Image: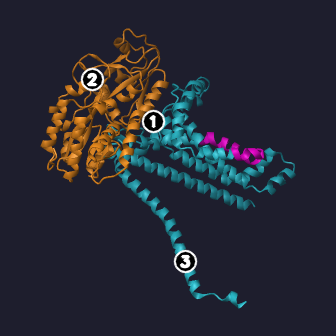
Chain colours: A cyan, B orange
Amino acid sequence: MNTVARIDPRHAAGQRLRERLFRGATLAAAFLVLLLLGGVAVSLLAGAWPALAHFKFAFLTREIWNPVTDQFGALAPIYGTLATSALALLLAIPVSFGIGIFLTELAPVWLKRPVGVAIELLAAVPSIIYGIWGLFVLAPILQRHVQPWLIATLGPLPLVGKLFQGPPFGIGVLTASFVLAIMVIPFIASVMRDVFETVPDVLKESGYGLGATTWEVIWQVVVPYARTGMIGGVMLGLGRALGETMAVTFVIGNAHRIGSSLLAPGTTISASIANEFAEAVGDLYTSSLVALGALLFLITFTVIAAARFMLMRLERQALSSV
Amino acid sequence: MSTFNMKRMLVAAAALAACSGATLGADISGAGATFPYPIYSKWADAYKQQTGIGLNYQSIGSGGGIKQIKAKTVTFGASDMPLKPDELQQAGLVQFPMIIGGVVPVVNVKGVQGGQMVLDGATVAAMYLGEITQWNDPRIKKLNPTLALPATAIAPIYRSDGSGTNFLFSNYLSNSYPKFKDSIGANTSVQWPVGIGAKGNEGVANMTAQTDGAVGYVEYAYAKQNKMAYADLINTAGKKVAPDADSFQAAAASADWRKAPGYYLILTNQSGDKSWPITGASFILLYGTPPDAAATGAALKFFDWAYKNGGKMAADLDYVPLPDALISQVRATWKAQIKGVAAM
């Protein structure tokens, strides 16, 4: 008995020191992230300052982007960034949801692994590959087969028709959204699959036991249980779509204009920076590009904050309903 | 003028591989334009084999090159867009042309082969302003009385990435059509009122090839090596010229460099019967009073060697070497303006 209780004091001191060191190291690692984030924010703001001070609020509200006369406004890239990301999510969420549900609830066991691995492999394809594929393969198909059909059938409609008018260039906002959707599907789908797998079998079996159909179990048991995680997956995809650069640059048409049609060329914040930064001469021009970067930072930050807020509210609801 | 064609890239890659073997302290350092990068690498490779001195050239773009030389982090900067004489003086820089290239309009019109169509600056500018919208427009017909031109809509394709190609082309359109100058102007990126932007020569080429009725513009070497359907142009002498090494050199030779302080001369719309109207030089920037005279001397030795021995290599990659008279003028400039360098 007394051999167990006796602790060597030197050994204990060493252990305490080790624990303190470890604690310090992890703390430093955590602070490093904050430091980096702060550094990025500060240098972006410093670089953007000349442009922001010169154009003031008009930088956000003007569509003009003219390096010859040094007149810059970010409205077209902001619009392009938000429009392509929103459209991409609109296309990607139903597909990803389908993949997640199929893999967890409906697929035969032998099919689950191959499909699951294939989706993860899709996430590992470099974005430039998507860009080149979009330009050389997808764009001609859209130009020859899909866009003429869209223009002919949806173009004449009132209201939505405006979105599908104009010449079929093959590249433009719609094509960029397609490519983005394909790029974010693996992220959203794999998160959805993982959260659907966390739904306890007991819950599902109780549902079936009460005579519920598969449809009812999915919508009334699985989805409500996994709701927070699903939103997390969507936000992950949105974050990727907002910042994607190379793939979009290849297929969006790179025009600093806001077209009323989805088939028209546009630009995004990251595409503009990638296109123009290397050859930008002049302080105001460079600074305006950095200001675009700062705006993207702000947009992404807002999206993440909004997602956090939504998740918090959902969790509170879930707690109060229990 | 960033480039992406296989032949040049391979040469550049081979040169890089050769350079990475042993790094000497005496390497020449430079940064800037992407357009001349393949030929600078090829020269550097040959030069290293002869002398053991390597070149560390970062092709980060003309804007970056100008910034780097002003920050004195490199021995020389390289730019496709020449700096204005007063800007040179302010920074204490000496500027000279190193290699010549040009831009070629390409078209995709049903039934029209390469070299069959003739255009002029004003007509092309009107296409890029959205004034001429169909290929059977009377202004195009007037230049091509024998071609059967369809009523296809014109789809102008432009380079979306900032580039010397954009600068040359917009400069040419500005010089040829006052309305373009007033509403758009010339720069490495401009605000095109119509059309779609594609990334790099390869993007423009691809979009032009896959869009019926497209008009685009690419670097000369790219158009040549990919056998694209180029258009001939009417130059300022009123003559029809085809894009080839002779017409580029003719433009460079007919330019009056003596009257251009700091070699600030853009070779668009040069006089001379044979001159290709969209020609341009790529420039080198050095300090007149170098912070490191030995390094600048080594760089000048390399440039001198390239002028002497580099012509054939440049032609192999479809660049155009400078005419001889211009080379001797540049050598005189080195003697007169770069101080404390005994090498020359």
Amino acid carrying label 1: it is Asn
Do dots 1 and 3 share one subunit?
yes
In the picture, residue B163 is in which quadrant? top left
Q: Tag 2, which secondary structure?
A: helix
Q: How far across and down, in percent of the image, does residue A264 sit?
A: 50, 31
The disc numbered 3 marks a residue on which chain? Answer: A
The residue sitting at 56% across, 54% down in the picture is A304
Q: Which of the two marks, 3 or 2, is nearer to us in this view?
A: 2
Q: Amino acid at mark 2?
A: Asp
Seen as rendered, the residue at the extreme bottom is A2
Q: Which residue is mark 2?
A: B246
Chain label for disc 2: B
Depth check, front residue: A238 or B220: B220
Q: Horizontal placement of A6 versus B219: left or right?
A: right
Q: CA distance from mark 3 to mark 2?
A: 76 Å
Tag of residue A18: 3
Q: Which residue is mark 1?
A: A254
